[in-house]
């Protein structure tokens, strides 16, 4: 049976689009079972509808507290039996109950080289800090905000004339390549979270995550794709 993704969004959904495109191109052996948004105006909802994917909109403002909202998300998402819950620009902090419920199958992409620049406005902060490189990180989600075990990262240079917009575009282009590739490892059963940390093909990976531009020998050859 195909690996079922539930993708959670709040905004334009360009990462969702990259996932949809990779599936359609045969580079990601999975299906998007449902797209959930906490905002009815999220552009990503239209992308899902165009691709024929079921959508759910749950407006967090209609719930008295985070716990009630998250419990509703859990019951709605579980109807779709997701193997992996994919945060793709989902801009809500998740409750402990939610994170625990999906432990080991909840994955996020964050627009920085974690552990640098957790939280918001990462591109601006990378520029302000004078960083010479920046990028994005895919990680398993735990209770610590942007602090779960890293899986993989893609680096970009920070150039002298960069502003926030240019830098964010450079990072986003890498996100759109990185996220489907990591999800394909997951869909192929190669990527798990064990008590000791992240395992790829049963072997522990480095704490900062695999640098996607420097894949160690032996990590190529995932089923159905020659992209890694
Ligand atoms: C992405 O850049 C993602 O890394 C970021 O939101 C953007 C969503 O873009 N996520 C976070 O900041 C999470 N803390 P998209 O809606 O076009 O995919």
Image: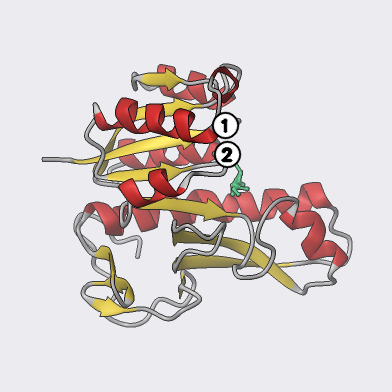
Which of disc 1 and disc 2 is earlier in sequence?
Answer: 1
Q: Secondary structure at mark 1?
A: loop
Q: In this view, which residue lies farthest toward the front?
A: 64
User: Quadrant for ligand 1?
Assistant: top right
Query: Is residue 20 at all visible to an observer of this figure?
Result: no
Q: Dot 2, crowdedness within 10 Å: few (<14), some or many (≥20)? A: some
Residue 133 is situated, as x and y percent measured from the top left of the image, at 71, 71
Residue at image position (61%, 18%) is 41
Numbered circles on residues, count: 2
Tell us which disc is closer to us: 2 or 1: 2
Which quadrant is home to the C terminus? bottom left
Q: Which mark is residue 167?
A: none
Q: Dot 1, crowdedness within 10 Å: few (<14), some or many (≥20)? A: many
Between 116 and 67, the residue placed more toward the observer is: 67
Residue 154 is situated, as x and y percent measured from the top left of the image, at 55, 65
Which quadrant is home to the N terminus? top left
Q: In the rendered image, which residue does mark 2 sit on?
A: 92
Q: Secondary structure at mark 2?
A: loop
Taking the image as shown, residue 132 lies to the left or right of residue 17, namely right
Question: Tags 2 and 1 in contact by the CB under 8 Å rule?
Answer: yes
29 is higher (above) or lower (below) than 210: above
Between 157 and 4, the residue placed more toward the observer is: 4
Residue at image position (56%, 59%) is 146
Q: In the rendered image, which residue does mark 1 sit on?
A: 10
Location of residue 59 (image quadrant): top right
């Amino acid at each position: 049976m195909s690996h079922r993704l539930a993708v959670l969004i709040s905004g334009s959904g360009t990462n969702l689009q990259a996932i949809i495109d990779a599936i359609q191109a045969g580079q990601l052996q999975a299906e998007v079972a449902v797209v959930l948004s906490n905002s009815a105006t999220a552009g990503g909802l239209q992308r899902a509808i165009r691709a024929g994917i079921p959508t759910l909109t749950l407006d967090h403002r209609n719930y008295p507290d985070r716990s009630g909202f998250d419990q509703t998300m859990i019951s709605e998402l579980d109807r779709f039996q997701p193997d992996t819950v994919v945060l793709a620009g989902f801009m809500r902090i998740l409750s402990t109950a939610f994170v625990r419920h999906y432990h080991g199958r909840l994955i996020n992409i964050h627009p920085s080289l974690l552990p640098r620049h957790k939280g918001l406005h990462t591109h601006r902060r990378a520029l302000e800090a004078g960083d010479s490189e920046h990028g994005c990180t895919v990680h398993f989600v735990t209770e610590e905000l942007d602090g779960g075990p890293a899986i993989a990262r893609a680096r970009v240079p920070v150039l002298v004339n960069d502003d926030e917009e240019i830098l964010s575009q450079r990072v986003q282009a890498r996100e759109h390549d990185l996220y489907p590739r990591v999800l394909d490892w997951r869909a192929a059963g190669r990527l798990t979270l064990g008590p000791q940390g992240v395992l790829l093909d049963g072997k522990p990976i480095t704490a900062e995550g695999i640098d996607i531009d420097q894949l160690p020998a032996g990590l190529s050859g995932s089923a159905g794709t020659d992209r890694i």
